[in-house]
Amino acid sequence: MELFDKQKDAVGQGERTLLVYVELPNNRHIHNGMDEFAELASSSGLSVLKNLKVSRNNAKAKHFIGSGKVEELAELVKELELDLVIFSAELSPSQERNLEADLKCQVMDRTGLILDIFSLRASSFEGKLQVELAQLRHLSTRLVRGWTHLERQKGGIGMRGPGETQLETDKRLIAVRIKNITKRLDKVHKQRDLGRKSRIKNELPMVALAGYTNAGKSTLFNTITKAEVFANDQLFATLDSTIRRVILPASGEAVIADTVGFIQNLPHDLVAAFKSTLEETSQANVLLHVVDAADEYNIEKIEQVQEIITDIGADKVPSILVMNKIDCVENLEPRLDRDENGRIFRVWISAQTGDGIDLLYQALAEQLSGMMTRAKIQIDVKSAYIRSEIHNIGYIHNEKVDDFGQWVLEINVTHHYLSKILSLKGVTLLWEQKAQ
């Protein structure tokens, strides 16, 4: 039996649950905090019987909440025959132990809930390792909960043990497991770094999708790449980072990366575990910050995502706000918004219906213009098929047929795609003018 099964803070499906949303001075400005907390519980498949809101100016050391509220919760647990109570606030290990002792049921905080959702959704090898690493780091601070009744093993003939408590044994085993997972992830990260260096060397543009969870990133990713990444109307529907090569109209070949969705107060252990995945965002040439245009709290969520983007070092990457789901809002049409310098900073689209995707391609082409080159090429008669491909990918300024029946094209494509074209048989470069 694996060690993690012994002490796992995981949630079983359909457990009778009470949600306690704790409102503190630092989160009173978050208008949808309670609704999002309930949605997280729903995403984990819990049977939520009641939601409570508790307002506090500061946390109590023993239970986080006051003793009177603890007594009230204990009565509710008994009356509703609850299996689980989840607090929106981050509880210390001792607070969890004290609450469990008084409430006579399992207690966890929002971090434990998010970790459980991640464990349910991770499907790739790397994703599973990242989630397990975050779970073990979280668990290592809470091991004492299950072993406070054990004393150091006594000596004597036939009674001499390893000289450590079960708690110490488990902490040591967890440390070994964390070390092994870290080594395996390092190998995966090195492979990822090699791929990233290869893209940079070949001047292959990279576009990363980022945004609040359930903003529609995976749907947009599928629309652009024609892939079939799992997309659903729920929090953290997609965890595993997915990278695809794609042909962008007017830009040519590029790489699109879909990353894990963000959420307010994303647990530190998860940010650390997914650091390599999130690095795809910081290494991108363009960042598409996907926003749910139909969400009445999207301004707050944009700010929260921006904070995480800054934390992972991606705030210097040129970004475009992609206001998605305009099909869910009346009288919203696809459009481009430009700033005072004429730069496109926002695009309004529907990834579900495809409305406005052409405007998004236009915005990407402008943003990637620094990676574009203007060139004149000659294509012989036998290789005329290349011309139709360039029509679909790049921008053709001028084209004509010379006296020998060969096509002469003046085109605008990325450096990478031009190199790819010139490697084909029957294509000759006449001149090239790189973007400044």
Image (tube, rainbow, N blue to C red):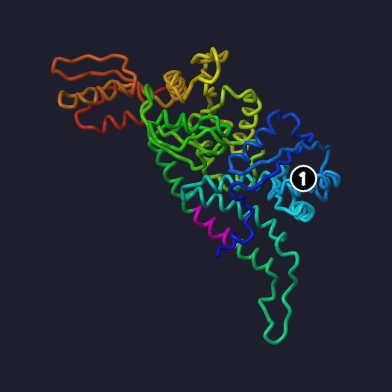
Q: Which contiguous range is marked in magenta?
A: 176-186
171 over 268 or under it: above or below = below
In this picture, residue 32 sits left or right of residue 127 = right
What amino acid is labelled 1 in the image? Leu
User: Residue 7's image quarter?
Assistant: bottom right
Q: Residue at x 49, y 20 (%)?
A: 349
Residue ranking furthest to the right: 68
Q: Nearer the viewer, residue 413 or 93?
A: 93
Q: Extreme front residue here? A: 79
> Could you tell me which residue is drawn at 55 percent across and 32 percent down?
214
Image height check: is 310 above or below 98?
above
Q: Is residue 400 visible?
A: yes
Relative image position of residue 209 (x, y in whole percent): 50, 32
Is 414 magenta? The answer is: no
Q: Is residue 181 left or right of residue 92?
A: left
Task: Determine the image quadrant of residue 377.
Answer: top left
Q: Can residue 436 be spotted in the picture?
A: no
Give coordinates of residue 157: x percent, y percent.
69, 87
Q: Position of residue 81 (x, y in %)?
A: 71, 49
| Residue 167 position (above or below residue 285) | below
The quadrant of the rendering that contains the N terminus is bottom right
In depth, the one of 6 and 50 nearer the eye is 50
Outermost left residue = 404
Q: Position of residue 205 (x, y in %)?
A: 42, 31
Q: How packed is label 1: few (under 14 Cα within 10 Å), some, or many (20 or more)? A: some
Q: In the visual, does 116 lie left or right of 231? A: right
Where disc 1 sits, the SS reads: helix
| Quadrant in which the C terminus is drawn | top left
Q: Is residue 249 above or below residue 310?
A: above
- Residue that carries the numbered disc 1 in the rendered image: 76
Residue drawn at x 68%, y 50% is 83
Does the stretch in magenta take in 181? yes
